[in-house]
Image: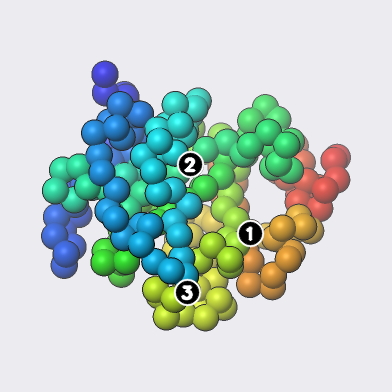
């Protein structure tokens, strides 16, 4: 059964026509194939290289797995918006206020064609996002610097330019993994329905404290 939240857009790129579809179910994902480029590079490996990983995410409450599909069922890009894992700092803000953009990836052949922007727009294109603090964590050791021919600082700036038009701003935090490298970045988007208390709690939580 089609998810009532599901939407899709058509994108015409130099490489060909694409469908970007949000809230893909595990059943839909099982009918797709990953572009092999996601797992074929010596210096870089995608966070998700198996359909099963995306299927497991899609079965979780409120999770939005968005796929960029060529030729009907070939995954050339994807994004995941989900609640943080239990035990992570960002899971401490209750009741389930924070959601993470866990991944936005496109295979190398399809980059610089607007896929990442289209995927992010579909991850955020639902009213419940305004009830959430949506965040992203950019860890430099996960970036495909070899494929993009960028330095870590250049890649960092590219991520910021991607997220800023959607209302994300960079926030300071003392979270240890983020502080490991100066290039790492933490950005957040506070929904318009998030209470003042929720915003204050988020401010304190960024530094490991509770109001």
The dot on residue 186 is 1
Residue tagged 3: 145
Q: Which residue is mark 2?
A: 81
Residue 147 screen position, x and y as percent: 39, 73
**The image quarter in which residue 142 lies:** bottom right
**Of label 3 and label 2, which has the lower sequence position?**
2
Which residue is drawn at the image coordinates 72% and 58% (left, top)? 177
What residue appears at the point 70 percent right and 30 percent down from the top-left corner? 94
Q: Residue at x 36, y 34 (%)?
A: 23
Could you tell me how far apart the alpha carbons at marks 3 and 1 are, in whole angstroms? 19 Å
Q: Residue at x 57, y 78 (%)?
A: 153
Badge 3 vs badge 1, beta-carbon distance below 8 Å: no
Residue 160 located left or right of residue 33: right
Q: Is residue 161 above or below residue 33?
A: below
**Callout 1 environment at 10 Å: few (<14), some (14 to 19), or many (20+)?**
many
Q: Which label number is shown at residue 13? A: none
Residue 141: x and y in percent read: 58, 66
- Does residue 48 sit above or below 87 in this rendering? below
| Along the viewing direction, whichever of 50 and 163 lies nearer the viewer | 50
Disc 2 crowd, CA 10 A, few/some/many (<14, 14-19, 20+): many
Q: CA distance from mark 3 to mark 2?
A: 23 Å
Pinpoint residue 123: horizontal percent, then vertical percent: 41, 44
Q: Nearer the viewer, mark 3 or mark 1?
A: 3
């Amino acid at each position: 059964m089609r998810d009532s939240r599901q939407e899709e857009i058509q994108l015409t790129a130099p490489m060909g026509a694409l469908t970007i579809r949000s809230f893909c179910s595990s059943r839909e994902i099982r009918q797709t194939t990953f572009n092999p480029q996601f797992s074929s590079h010596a210096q870089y490996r995608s966070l998700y290289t198996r359909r099963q990983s995306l299927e497991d995410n899609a079965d979780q409450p409120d999770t939005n797995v968005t796929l960029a599909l060529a030729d009907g069922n070939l995954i050339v890009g994807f994004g995941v918006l989900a609640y943080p894992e239990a035990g992570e700092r960002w899971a401490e803000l209750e009741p389930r206020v924070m959601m993470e953009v866990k991944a936005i990836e496109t295979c190398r052949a399809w980059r610089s064609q607007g896929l990442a922007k289209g995927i992010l727009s579909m991850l955020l294109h639902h009213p419940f996002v305004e009830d959430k603090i949506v965040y992203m964590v950019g860890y430099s050791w996960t970036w495909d610097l070899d494929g993009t021919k960028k330095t870590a600082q250049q890649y960092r700036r590219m991520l910021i330019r991607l997220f800023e038009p959607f209302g994300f701003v960079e926030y300071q935090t003392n979270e240890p993994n983020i502080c490991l490298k100066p290039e790492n970045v933490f950005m957040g988007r506070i929904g318009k329905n998030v209470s003042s208390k929720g915003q204050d709690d988020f401010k304190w939580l960024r530094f490991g404290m509770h109001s």
